[in-house]
């Protein structure tokens, strides 16, 4: 019985896979027709977007892991300059709650870090330990605890040439072990 069900679902998967390919091909072909009639200004961004999406979708995001040992899994965070939006997923693989071992990711210029960290400590967990409206902060995630994950986006256009940038956790006392360099690639 189980084998029979497995065969059925395998067949269903095969069918849906075939169907998916046909569906994917059809809109692409039909999308070209209205584009020819549309004004050039309107047609250009649409076709550029659909052409870039398949290759850039995977590259415009990264996953950073953190744990109960107060560590990120890396000391360098690479952000792709060519991305319109860069997505960062923060995972907390530990078991401790956010109140005891909370982690976030905050990104700022290195010269702004100490100010952001000290103001963040006074901003409380309700504000994810980030001072509300802090213009030195380029982007930041929410504060999470063990077993949780959160996603935030960074605008790569906010990084200036020639400046140094850092990422770090602003939970009080965590900066020392939880910081690294932001590298624009
Ligand atoms: Co932390």
Image: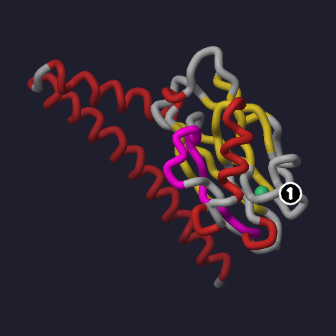
Indicate whether residue 80 is drawn in magenta. Answer: no
Residue sitting nearer the eye, 7 or 114: 114
Answer with the quarter of the image where residue 59 lies: top right
Q: Position of residue 132 (x, y in %)?
A: 52, 54
- Is 53 on the left or on the right of 76, as rendered? left
Direction top: furthest residue: 162
What residue is drawn where x is 85% and y is 52%?
Answer: 71
Left or right: residue 20 versus residue 138 is left
Q: Nearer the viewer, residue 121 or 169?
A: 121
Residue 135 lies in the magenta-colored region: yes
Q: Label 1 belongs to which residue? A: 70
- Rendered-image quadrant of the C terminus: top right
Hey, which quadrant is residue 40 in on the image?
Answer: top left
Q: Write the start and end of the magenta stretch as one range.
A: 132-146
- Residue that appears at 18% across and 26% down: 42
Residue 32 is situated, as x and y percent measured from the top left of the image, at 21, 28
Find numbered disc 1 in the image and state the secondary structure of the residue it sits on. Answer: loop
Quadrant of the drawing holding the N terminus = bottom right
x, y percent for residue 46: 27, 30
- How packed mark 1 is, by other alpha carbons closer than 10 Å (few <14, some 14-19, many 20 or more), is some
Say which residue appears at 28% left-offset and 40% top-offset: 26
Magenta region, main secondary structure: loop
Side (left or right) of 1 relative to 48: right
In the image, the residue with mark 1 has its CB under 8 Å from the nearest atom of ligand 1? yes
Q: Is residue 120 above or below residue 29?
A: below
User: Which residue is at the front of the view, 61 or 132?
Assistant: 132
């Amino acid at each position: 019985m189980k084998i029979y069900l497995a065969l059925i679902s395998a067949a269903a998967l095969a069918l849906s896979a075939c169907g998916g390919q046909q569906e994917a091909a059809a809109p692409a072909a039909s999308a070209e027709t209205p584009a020819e009639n549309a004004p050039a200004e309107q047609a250009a961004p649409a076709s550029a977007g659909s052409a870039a999406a398949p290759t850039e979708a995977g590259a415009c995001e990264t996953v950073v892991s953190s744990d109960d040992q107060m560590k990120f899994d890396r000391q360098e965070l690479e952000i792709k300059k060519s991305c319109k939006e860069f997505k960062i997923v923060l995972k907390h693989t530990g078991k401790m709650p956010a109140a005891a071992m909370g982690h976030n990711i905050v990104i700022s210029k290195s010269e702004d870090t100490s100010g952001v960290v000290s103001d963040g400590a006074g901003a409380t967990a309700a504000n994810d330990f980030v001072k509300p409206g802090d213009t030195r902060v380029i982007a930041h995630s929410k504060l999470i605890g063990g077993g949780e994950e959160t996603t935030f986006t960074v605008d790569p256009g906010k990084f200036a040439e020639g400046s140094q940038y850092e990422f770090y956790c602003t939970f009080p006392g965590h900066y020392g072990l939880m910081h690294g360099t932001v590298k624009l690639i």
